[in-house]
Amino acid sequence: MTVTQLTIVVLAVFMAAFIGISWWTSRQNSATAGSYVVGDRSLGTFPLLLSMSATYFSTWTLLGSFGSYYRDGLWFTAFGTWAVIQVSVYVWLFGGRIWLAGKRFGFITPGQMMEHYYRSPVLRLAYTLVGICALVPVMLIQLTGGATALESLTDGAIPYTVGVTIASVSVATVVLWAGFRGTVWMDAFMGVFFGAVMLFSLAFVAGRTGYLDMFRSAAEADPSRLVVSGRPFEMLELWLGLSIGAWVLPHMWQKFYSARDPKVLGKVAAISPFWTSWLMALVPMFIGIAAIVPGLVPGADENSDSILPLLFAEYLPIVGALVVAGILAAAMSTINSQLLSSASLVAEDVWRRFFDRELTGRRLRNVNRVVVAGLTLLVYLIALSPQGAGYLVPVSALGFGLGLQLVPTALGVLYLRGITPHGALAGLVAGVVALALVAITGLSPLGPGLSGLAVNIAVTAVVSRFTAPVDPEQVATYRHLFSRYYREEAPIVRASEQEGVR
């Protein structure tokens, strides 16, 4: 059996597993939007931990980060900082508060919370649209990365176009069928699998390069890549975008809603550094730097984002087939939650809120289906364009930069009392405009995301200083909700207390 044939067989097995999981989980979905979008807020520690880890074990981690370490050297260690901080500190700081408000008022999207707190439908719409736009580049790299890896391993026998098409059709079908529970259990399946792949890859490369002697060999080949090359603003933007910008993206926000209770989120925050974080921080760095050693990874210069499949294609083609087919499946397990989140935002925050307040049941599902199909087609067409198949990290950095623009508005709900509705809206709009201008012109040394955030914060602060604050009773309601739980003055909010927000 050739490598191409073996890869096809392995990919077929993964697809069969995905279909089986989708069928099993679809039987547990009820007809409510809360079931389809956040799984009835019923996730325990194990599935939520693995679902979050699979969201991180995407083509960003399994392909893009390896390539960035190879191209940029140790400068890319900002990625490792994010890997430790994002999964633990930010889940701990924000996850419990997001869950409490979602449970109390029946939120299933971030935009619902923004409108309820700030009493601003326009802010809800703006927040939702920016969130969806932020997810498009992150979804894009899942398709392009998986398809590129498949093409690399099979030496073009499975073309890039075929890989993109398989992933697009498969993920759209699964999302429409299985909903949130399906994406969670597919994520859990892939989280375990790729945790094992990362550990095996580390052991394999370490054995071939003499373990820590690898750094000496890499330094002899190209000492410049083992010295941090400066670029402080670029590093800061990378770190902020990956850490603060990532937790506020809609699909992560909705994972916070889905937990059974805040204690589950606390356990996820405590366990993650010992599972997801160190794997993402250390394995890409070790293998990406090892690839600098001459002859270890043939073809790395021409296709640095495919170091892992190129490595196994050279030494262990059988394992390579498993890894690459799994990379494509991992890309699907990441994009599925992002696609589901985007569809729910359009259905709840745009269509139901502004066009059809009575949208429920089958009609709501139909809107979700149309949005999933439309977004899948959009990302598919971008992936096939000449600009779509760029380096994975720079492409996705645009999405995380847009995510940064959501942070001041979100912090106004969760922590900062001084942000007004007009200040939040003006800052969000100004930040996005500044990001776009810098991305197009390259005039600011800060980079697009950081420039947008700086403008965002400044405009938010100035406008908030001169406009009407949030209703004091509303502020008190949220602060009391947070404080009474963390001080253990009252039990967790019961489902009967939910008010529901549309």
Image (cartoon, grey):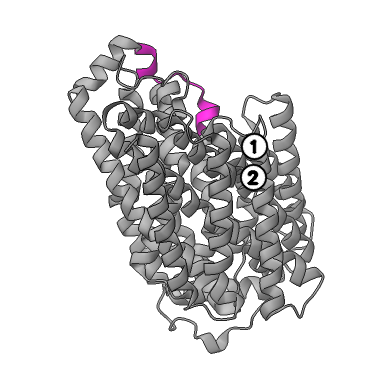
User: Which element carries disc 1, helix, strand or loop?
Assistant: helix
Q: Is residue 219 above or below residue 155?
A: above
Q: Is 270 inside the magenta-drawn segment?
A: no
Q: Quadrant of the N terminus?
A: top left
Which residue is drawn at the image coordinates 61% and 49% (left, top)? 135
Amino acid at dot 1: Leu
Say which element carries label 2: helix
Crowding around mark 1 (Cα neighbors within 10 Å: few <14, some 14 to 19, many 20+) is some
Q: Position of residue 277 (x, y in %)?
A: 35, 47
Residue at the location (27% across, 32% down)?
Answer: 316
Q: Start and end of the magenta stretch?
A: 223-237
457 and 277: which is toward the camera: 277
- Alpha-carbon distance for marks 2 and 1? 6 Å
Query: Where does the C terminus fall, quadrant-wise?
Result: bottom right
Disc 1: which residue: 384
Q: Is residue 235 magenta?
A: yes
Which quadrant holds residue 160?
A: top right
Answer left or right for 142 relative to 380.
Answer: left
Q: Disc 2 designates what residue? A: 380
Kind of residue indicated by mark 2: Tyr
Q: Is residue 16 above or below residue 451?
A: below
